[in-house]
């Protein structure tokens, strides 16, 4: 699988680092489904990068009225007939014309809950036991998979100058009574959803809860509260060829930059929506297939350009469908990775493997958290300020180089002897152990509900 990864970036990095890099690229695409088959990449030879003769220099706007023939749904077999360079066209969304009003920005010096430090607290933490949670994923159960040090479970987030509301499962259930809470996004967001189930489930007797698995939408039901806690797999937010949680194309992401409809049909009746999207845009260029494109011509865009289009399509849906008095929408910012230990300890050649404590350096920011992406997200959500709240997990999670599974999780392929001799080469420094960092993201959510 590693050899098949089509990334052709030239790099002078040492072999170990290169292997880590390739490995993590692969792992983030993998779902933890127990029976997951290793994805067999079909070589799509017919697809070529055409020379764009007619690349428009200026940004053009696409008429976003529905095309006469509804566009074909994308799936993992979808292909582009040809590919040209992204022309810069955008959909004509209302959100593009909204300007965030700088004057209206709050100036009151309320405490920034996202700015703080991690303190060891082994009386309140962990908030649940790994082995007690029936919904725990093998991808995140680090202790079960042999992690010997458990300090990563005992850290509390302490904001500077104020306190985070203490987690209380019964109180959370009261907030969720007669409601639907839905997490929408990629495997990081799924980790947060699993954390939420683990945080909540113990107060519900076994015969009063149920879960419907194996679908793009997984639903946990708590009968007594008439409430659901759901997860929808939508790694690119908009419709794409990767919307199947198990079988998706990792090498060639094709997306509809102007359509969230496939996913949004499920969002309509949800009371609390929690979105994320980031790492899937960090894997090189994406292909755009506009809804009114009838000849299968894709445009190849950089990840950040693609994400911006997706965020705008999403923002447009929020703008026209969310009544802030009735519904709550959250956007969780990028989850940091810890792929290069030299970023927090110069001279070292490792990654998160073997890390046992958080970073102490206030304001530490690693190369995995892309600032242009953060600014773009900032910009889009600012226009939606009355409707969307940001859960800014990036800085706080940057400190937690100790929070990743590294080698202590289930892997779907057996390890070669060479890899086993060098654990760093297959460490997962992207996802997070549970109990752990995502529990605190959920405490933030609880705090804002
Ligand atoms: C654009 O959409 C509007 C309806 O919103 C329609 O009246 C108009 O004819 C469309 N223009 C083009 C060029 O398709
Ligand atoms: C948790 O919340 C419930 C219901 O809101 C309340 O009765 C209980 O005292 C709270 N528990 C703690 C430890 O604060
Ligand atoms: C359960 O919750 C839904 C909203 O999610 C509501 O429409 C329905 O009336 C509730 N059912 C009961 C029995 O309260
Ligand atoms: C999140 O926090 C970081 C650092 O604390 C800040 O630079 C960034 O602008 C924030 N992002 C959003 C979307 O609020």
Image (cartoon, rainbow, N blue to C red):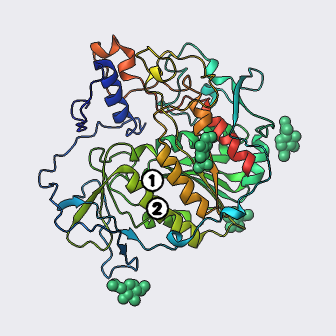
Which quadrant of the view contains residue 48?
bottom left
- Quadrant of the rendered image containing residue 111: top right
- Tell me the residue at 56%/37% (across/down): 135
| Mark 2 → mark 1, Cα distance in angstroms | 7 Å
Q: Is residue 406 visible?
A: no
Badge 1 element: loop
Left/right placement of residue 381 relative to residue 259 reads: right
> Relative to 370, is 347 above or below?
above
Q: Quadrant of ligand 3?
A: bottom right
Residue drawn 40% across the image and 71% down it: 91
Q: As drawn, is 378 to the left or to the right of 299?
A: right
Q: Give the label on residue 94, or none.
A: none
| Residue 230 image point, x, y percent | 57, 51
Q: Are marks 2 and 1 in contact (CB under 8 Å)?
A: yes
Front position in the image: 220 or 260:
260
Q: Residue furthest left?
A: 46
Which residue is under mark 2? 263
Q: Foreground: 147 or 118? A: 118
Task: Work out whether 238 lies above or below 432.
Answer: below
Q: Residue at x 49, y 67 (%)?
A: 265
Residue drawn at x 23%, y 73% is 294
Residue 277 shows up from this direction: yes
- The spot of residue 304 in percent (x, y) is 40, 51
User: For the residue labelled by badge 2, is the local secondary structure a helix, a strand or a loop?
Assistant: helix
Quarter of the picture containing the N terminus is top left
Disc 1 designates what residue? 234
* Relative image position of residue 340 (x, y in whole percent): 43, 24
Chain-order first, disc 2 or disc 1 = 1
């Amino acid at each position: 699988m590693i050899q098949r990864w089509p990334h052709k970036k030239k790099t002078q990095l040492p072999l170990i680092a290169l292997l880590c890099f390739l490995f993590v690229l692969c792992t983030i695409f993998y779902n933890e489904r127990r029976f997951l088959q290793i994805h067999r990449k079909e070589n799509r030879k017919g697809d070529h990068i055409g020379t764009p003769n007619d690349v428009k220099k200026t940004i053009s706007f696409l008429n976003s009225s529905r095309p006469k023939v509804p566009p074909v749904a994308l799936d993992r077999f979808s292909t582009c007939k040809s590919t040209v360079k992204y022309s810069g066209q955008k959909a004509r969304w209302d959100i593009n014309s909204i300007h965030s009003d700088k004057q209206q920005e709050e100036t009151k010096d309320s405490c920034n809950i996202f700015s703080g430090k991690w303190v060891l607290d082994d009386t309140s933490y962990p908030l649940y036991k790994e082995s007690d949670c029936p919904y725990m994923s093998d991808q995140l159960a680090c202790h079960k998979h042999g992690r010997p040090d458990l300090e990563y479970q005992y850290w509390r987030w302490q904001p500077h100058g104020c306190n985070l509301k203490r987690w209380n499962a019964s109180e959370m259930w009261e907030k969720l009574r007669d409601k639907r809470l839905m997490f929408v996004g990629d495997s990081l967001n799924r980790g947060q959803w699993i954390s939420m189930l683990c945080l909540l489930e113990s107060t519900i007797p076994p015969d009063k809860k149920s879960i419907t698995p194996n679908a793009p939408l997984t639903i946990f039901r708590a009968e007594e509260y008439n409430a659901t806690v759901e997860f929808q797999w939508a790694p690119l937010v908009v419709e794409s060829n990767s919307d199947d949680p198990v079988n998706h194309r990792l090498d060639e992401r094709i997306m509809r930059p102007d359509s969230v409809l496939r996913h949004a049909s499920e969002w309509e009746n949800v009371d609390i929506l929690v979105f994320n999207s980031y790492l899937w845009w960090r894997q090189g260029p994406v292909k755009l297939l506009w809804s009114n494109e009838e000849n299968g011509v894709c445009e190849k865009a950089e990840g950040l350009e693609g994400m911006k289009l997706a965020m705008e399509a999403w923002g447009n849906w929020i703008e026209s469908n969310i009544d802030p008095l009735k519904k709550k929408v959250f956007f969780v910012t990028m989850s940091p990775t810890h792929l290069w230990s030299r970023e927090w300890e110069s001279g070292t050649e490792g990654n998160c493997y073997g890390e046992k404590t958080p970073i102490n350096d206030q304001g530490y920011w690693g190369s995995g958290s892309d600032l242009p992406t953060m600014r773009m997200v900032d910009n889009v959500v600012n226009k939606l300020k009355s409707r969307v709240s940001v859960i800014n997990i990036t800085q706080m999670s940057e400190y937690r180089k100790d929070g990743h599974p590294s080698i202590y999780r289930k892997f779907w392929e057996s390890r070669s002897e060479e890899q086993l001799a060098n654990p760093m080469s297959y460490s997962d420094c992207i996802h997070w152990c549970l109990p752990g960092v995502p529990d605190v993201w959920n405490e933030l959510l609880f705090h804002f509900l």
